[in-house]
Amino acid sequence: DIQMTQSPSTLSASVGDRVTITCRASQSINVWLAWYQQKPGKTPKLLIYKASILEGGVPSRFSGSGSGTEFTLTISSLQPDDSASYYCQHYITHPYTFGQGTRLEI
Amino acid sequence: EVQLLESGGGLVQPGESLTLSCAASGLTLSHYAMRWVRQAPGKGFEWVSIISASTDKTYYPDSVKGRFTISKDHSKNTLYLEMNSLRADDTAMYYCVRDLGYFDYWGQGALVTVSS
């Protein structure tokens, strides 16, 4: 199985900051990577797919980049509503696996 | 608007059974692969079953193979997860999701607690 490793596990930042979360795959996944946001007690929400394509309705301050084994999720100007956990997930081959998550505190 | 509405969660004892339902509106289940994904309290995500779009082929991880069964009722546009021989480590929130490789639509979740 492909292992997905996110860093950092926890991140504390302030409103207006630029924040970057990294996701590394144990082998190349090309661009077959998605990012999700999950607020406490809520359903996960798709933010980005195919490494860099923003899902409809997601604010443009979110962006994704990368290919192969290293990927980043960037929030350009942090807002209070961005406090959540963020997860990456590959979908190149079964089983699709998730990273362990990054908790973003504001 | 797409909605996936889950039901059937609850508290059961080890060894008991439970069936989750996921009623879909705004999308036709026979057109898409669907998946059940679970999240144990405070943990990450684990897929527990997949069903293909029209042929209804099913796949399971070793952790639930032989105990869980995913199915669809096309006439009701509803997805099911039958869970047997439940164990404490099956305790989790269970989500039905549309599987495009990535998961764009999620149900609200059904909490399954296995405890004596």
Image (cartoon, coloured by chain):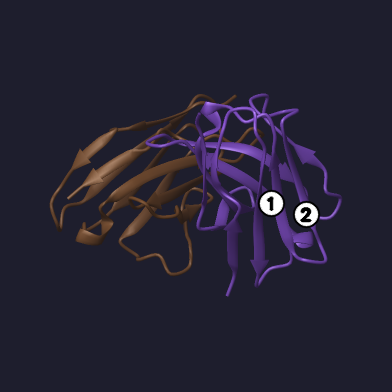
Chain colours: A brown, B purple
Which residue: 33% across, 45% down? A85
Which residue: 20% across, 60% down? A80
Q: Residues within 10 Å of mark 2 (few under 14, many from 20)?
A: many
Nearest the eye: B112 or B116 = B116
Q: Relative to A102, is B75 on the left or the right?
A: right
The picture places residue B94, in percent across and down from the top left corner, at 55, 45
The picture places residue A81, in percent across and down from the top left corner, at 25, 61
Amino acid bearing label 2? Lys
Q: CA distance from mark 1 to mark 2?
A: 9 Å
The picture places residue A11, in percent across and down from the top left corner, at 22, 39
Q: Is residue A24 above or below residue B112?
A: above
Q: Residue furthest right?
A: B55
Residue B98: tell me if it is visible.
yes
| Residue on which the image places disc 1 | B34
SS label for mark 2:
strand
Q: Is residue B24 above or below residue B93?
A: below
Q: Is residue A15 above or below residue A24?
A: below
- Tell me which label, 1 or 2, sits earlier in the chain: 1
Q: Are marks 1 and 2 on the same chain?
A: yes
Amino acid bearing label 1? Met
| Residue on which the image places disc 2 | B72
Residue A79: tell me if it is visible.
no
Q: Residues within 10 Å of mark 1 (few under 14, many from 20)?
A: many
Which residue: 55% across, 58% down? B107
Q: Relative to B16, is A76 on the left or the right?
A: left
Which residue: 65% across, 70% down? B25
In the picture, which quadrant includes the N terminus of chain B? bottom right
Host chain of mark 2: B
Q: Is residue B43 above or below residue A36?
A: above
